[in-house]
Image (cartoon, rainbow, N blue to C red):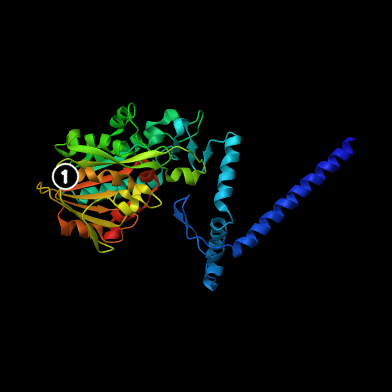
């Protein structure tokens, strides 16, 4: 066979492959229009885009086309199978990075830290946070930004993995923000405690971005010291409530694994009385733990039952201290360590909170304020700045 014939044959196969691929994509797109619409993906643990409603405004401003694109992507026939096949292909090709997540050693999936330096958005957040802390100087305030696995377990990242340096960003943020110079503010650094605990115990879930309850307990040692709480490790006892936990990073990255973790609850040995009120849903319960959340699609929701704009916790503690906690979901595993030491705790998740925070502080007369976030969400999220800004109070 001469060179000309070989080129013709290659061209024929290339055109055939291209034609088949386009035909398959078109066929699947058409089928997706008649495929049963799913509301929730159990493997990805999120709500899926629903069929958009056609409107003149949506066509003009482009939102309709964006909604159609999201709908077709989410409702693609046999989507879970395609996600798995894509993961399998990446594994065969030796690809260790997908959707911002690295496939690390020892079964760990680790979310990469994207920032490398303090930018203008960070500086604006610093100004807003400083202003908020200064105008609420009557509160004893604590800022605890928790290192993630990309810092503490960086040795488990794939060799040569390009990423921002979480530790350097944190140190730069703290030094340039100058919050530690405010007389009423204590910056709680728990990196050393987590690094030490990681030598002997699991402080992060292997397929989820959250820390384990043991990780939260290690960080609480430093927080308790700074908040002047009489904490002793022997005051709590651990109970395993889930032994087959697989987290959201496995589904969002497509790096499927047989790795399963346990979820533990640390309960105080001394009996305590708890009353939790969901201000928005107007419901009450006598525990901070949710059996429904534990048995649902995301067992991490055993802590508080998930995330809400405002929760109020009344306890049997006689300390007289009243805490306002501004947080992301990392803090959920920490709540059980706080309840024995505060008579009342208001929990605000800025992602879902829409009220006037300054007014709430004025009315409730808190004694303490704790801002508790993991570094990754603190660096990326804008909701905290929106809630703390003076514009939100006007």
Query: Which image quadrant is residue 377 in?
Result: top left
Query: What is the x, y in percent for residue 52?
Result: 52, 66
Q: How many marks?
A: 1
The quarter in which the C terminus is drawn is bottom left
**Is residue 240 in sight in this rendering?**
yes
Q: Could you say which is closer to the camera, residue 47 or residue 97?
A: 47
Q: Which residue is mark 1?
A: 340
Q: Could you say which is closer to the camera, residue 197 or residue 128?
A: 197
Q: Residue at x 67, y 59 (%)?
A: 27
Query: What is the x, y in percent for residue 229?
Result: 15, 39
Would you place residue 52 above or below residue 313 in this image?
Answer: below
Query: Which image quadrant is residue 150 in?
Result: top left
Query: What is the x, y in percent for residue 222?
Result: 23, 34
Query: What is the x, y in percent for residue 317?
Result: 12, 47
Would you place residue 191 above or below residue 279 in this image?
Answer: above
Q: Residue at x 37, y 51 (%)?
A: 382
Specify whether 33 is left or right of 174.
right
Q: Could you say which is closer to the camera, residue 69 or residue 360?
A: 69
For mark 1, give the secondary structure: helix
Query: Which image quadrant is residue 215 in?
Result: top left
**Is residue 385 in sight in this rendering?**
no
The quarter in which the N terminus is drawn is top right
Q: Could you say which is closer to the camera, residue 8 or residue 174?
A: 8
How many neighbours does mark 1 have within 10 angstroms: few (below 14), some (14-19), or many (20 or more)? Answer: many
Residue projecting furthest to the bottom: 56
């Amino acid at each position: 066979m001469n060179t000309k014939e070989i080129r013709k044959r290659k061209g024929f196969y290339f055109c055939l492959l291209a034609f088949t691929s386009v035909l398959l994509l078109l066929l699947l797109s058409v089928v997706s229009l008649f495929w049963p619409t799913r509301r929730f993906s159990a493997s990805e643990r999120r709500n899926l885009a629903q069929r958009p409603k056609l409107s003149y405004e949506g066509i003009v401003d482009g939102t309709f086309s964006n909604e159609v694109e999201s709908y077709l992507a989410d409702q693609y026939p046999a989507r879970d199978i395609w996600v798995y096949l894509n993961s399998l292909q990446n594994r065969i090709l030796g690809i260790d990075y997908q959707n911002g997540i690295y496939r690390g050693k020892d079964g760990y999936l680790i979310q990469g830290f994207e920032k490398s330096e303090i930018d203008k958005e960070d500086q604006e957040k610093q100004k807003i946070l400083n202003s908020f802390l200064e105008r609420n100087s009557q509160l004893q305030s604590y800022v605890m930004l928790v290192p993630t696995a990309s810092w503490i377990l960086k040795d488990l990242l794939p060799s040569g993995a390009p990423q921002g340096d979480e530790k350097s960003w944190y140190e730069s943020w703290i030094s340039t923000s100058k919050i530690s110079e405010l007389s009423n503010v204590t910056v709680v650094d728990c990196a050393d405690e987590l690094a030490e605990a990681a030598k002997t115990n699991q402080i992060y879930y292997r397929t989820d971005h959250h820390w384990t309850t043991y990780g939260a307990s290690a960080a609480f040692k430093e927080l308790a010291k700074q908040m002047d709480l009489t904490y002793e490790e022997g005051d709590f006892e651990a109970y395993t409530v889930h032994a087959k936990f697989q987290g959201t990073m496995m589904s969002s990255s497509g790096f499927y694994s047989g790795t399963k973790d346990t979820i533990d609850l640390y309960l105080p040995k001394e009996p305590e009385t708890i009353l939790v009120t969901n201000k928005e849903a107007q419901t009450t319960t006598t525990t901070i733990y949710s059996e429904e959340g534990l048995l649902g699609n995301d067992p991490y929701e055993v802590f508080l039952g998930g995330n809400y704009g405002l929760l109020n916790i009344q306890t049997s503690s006689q300390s007289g201290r009243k805490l306002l906690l501004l947080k992301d979901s990392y803090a959920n595993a920490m709540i059980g360590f706080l309840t024995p030491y505060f008579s009342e705790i208001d929990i605000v998740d800025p992602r879902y909170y829409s009220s006037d925070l300054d007014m709430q502080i004025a009315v409730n007369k808190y004694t303490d304020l704790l801002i508790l976030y993991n570094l990754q969400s603190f660096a990326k999220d804008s909701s905290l700045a929106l809630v703390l800004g003076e514009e939100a109070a006007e």
